[in-house]
Image (cartoon, rainbow, N blue to C red):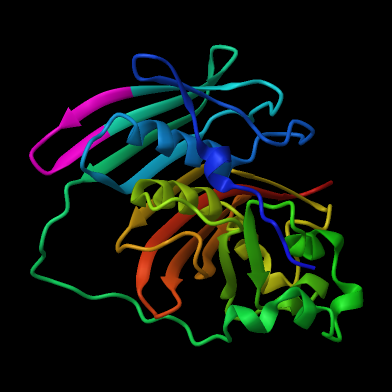
Amino acid sequence: MQKSGIDLSAILDVGSIGIDQFRGNSPSASDQRVFGGLVIGQAMFAACRTVKARLPHSLHCYFIHSGDPQVPLIYKVERLRDGKSYSTRRVTALQRGTAIVSMIVSFHRGEEGAFEHQEIMPEVPGPEHFAAEELSRHSLYPDLPEIVRRYYEPDRPVELRPIEIGRYVGQKVEDGRVHMWMKAAAKLPDDPALHICALAYASDLSLLDAVMARYGRTLFDGRILSGSLDHAMWFHRPFRADDWLLYAKDSPSAQSGRGHARGLIFRRDGTLVASVAQEGSVRERR
C-alpha cells in the first residue's frame, strides 16, 4: 500500500506571536511527553526566522524539563550576535512560563575553505533492501516488537529503515555500530533552512538507542528508563531531508546511569552532511 506521509514542514512551522517570539504545537497530544526532536526542529525554525541570508551550521541544546504535548510551545529568540561571517541566536522553549529546552544556534554566511575532508561512509545495503515488503519476508519478522514495525506505518513524518534488525530480538552488535536509513515521509519545499530543521528533528529519532546495541537490548523493551539530557549537531554540506540519508550511530561510553551516543549522517552518494552527539539518562527499571 502506498504511503501518503505526514508533512514534516507543517509540524515544524511556528507562528509569530510578537517580536522574536513564536508558538508551536505538538502534533501528538496523546503522547506522554513532547518528542525532543520536535522542540529541536521548531526552535531551529524560530531561530531561522530571525536571520537573513545565512544558514545554521551548528546547534547545542539542553533538555531541562519534559514537555506536555497538550500545551503550546513558546519559543523566545535572543539575538546574541550578527557579525560579518557568523550570527548567533539563543532560543528558549517555554511551557506555562517555565523553560523546558535551552538552545544556542550559530549561523554562517558560507565561504570557500582551504581544507576539505570527511569521514568515509560505511558500506551498507541501500534503503530499498529494507522496505516493508522486504522486511515482511525476513525470518525475524514475526519476532520483531511492535514499535519496530511501526517504523513502516504511513502516519509518521519521518520514514525509518533500520539495518541491524537482529538487535531488536536480542542479537548483540559487538562493536556497537548501528545504521538506519531515514528521510522525510512527504516532499519538502525547496528551502535549505527547512531541510536543516527537518534533519535536526529526525536526528533525535532513536539516537540514544545506540547505547544498548552492545548488549542485545533496546530502549523499547520496557525495562529501560531513558531520556535525552542534551543534543548537539553540526551541518557540513548541502542535502535534502526528503532524500534517503544514512544515519551511522555508535556509543563510545556508558557509565553512572548516563550513555553517550554520536552519529554521522550521509547522503546516498557518500557525502557527509551532518554530525550529531547526545548524552542521555539510561537506567534499568528496578
Q: Which is nearer the eye, 195 or 189?
A: 189
Horizontal side of 238 relative to 72 (left or right) equals left
Residue 105 placement, left or right of 230: left
> Is residue 271 positioned above or below 279 on the image?
below
Q: For the point 13% across and 71% down, which residue is it?
A: 115
Residue nearest the viewer, comparing 47 with 7: 7
Would residue 229 be visible to someone looking at this image? Answer: no
* The N terminus lies in quadrant: bottom right
Using the rendered view, name the quadrant where residue 158 is placed: bottom right
- Magenta stretch? 78-88
Q: Is residue 114 above or below residue 96?
A: below
Magenta stretch: helix, strand or loop mostly: strand
Residue 21 place in picture, x, y as percent: 41, 18
Would residue 115 appear left or right of 274 to someone viewing this image?
left
Query: Where on the picture, by quarter, is residue 212?
Result: bottom right
Q: Is residue 224 left or right of residue 68?
A: right
Residue placed at 78% from the left, 64% from the top? 148
Nearer to me, 207 or 268 = 268
- Which residue is drawn at the image coordinates 67% and 35% (left, top)? 27
Where's residue 274, x and y in %? 38, 62
| Residue 72 located within the stretch drawn in magenta | no
Residue 272 picture location, percent across and down = 36, 71
Whether residue 256 is visible to the viewer of this picture, yes or no, is: yes
Q: Eyeballing the image, is 24 above or below 118?
A: above
- Taking the view exactly as shown, the residue that stands out farthest to the right is 142
Q: Residue at x 66, y 20 (%)?
A: 71
**Relative height, residue 122 to residue 278 (above, below):** below
Residue 83 sits inside the magenta stretch: yes
| Percent coordinates x, y for residue 246 in the rendering | 51, 72
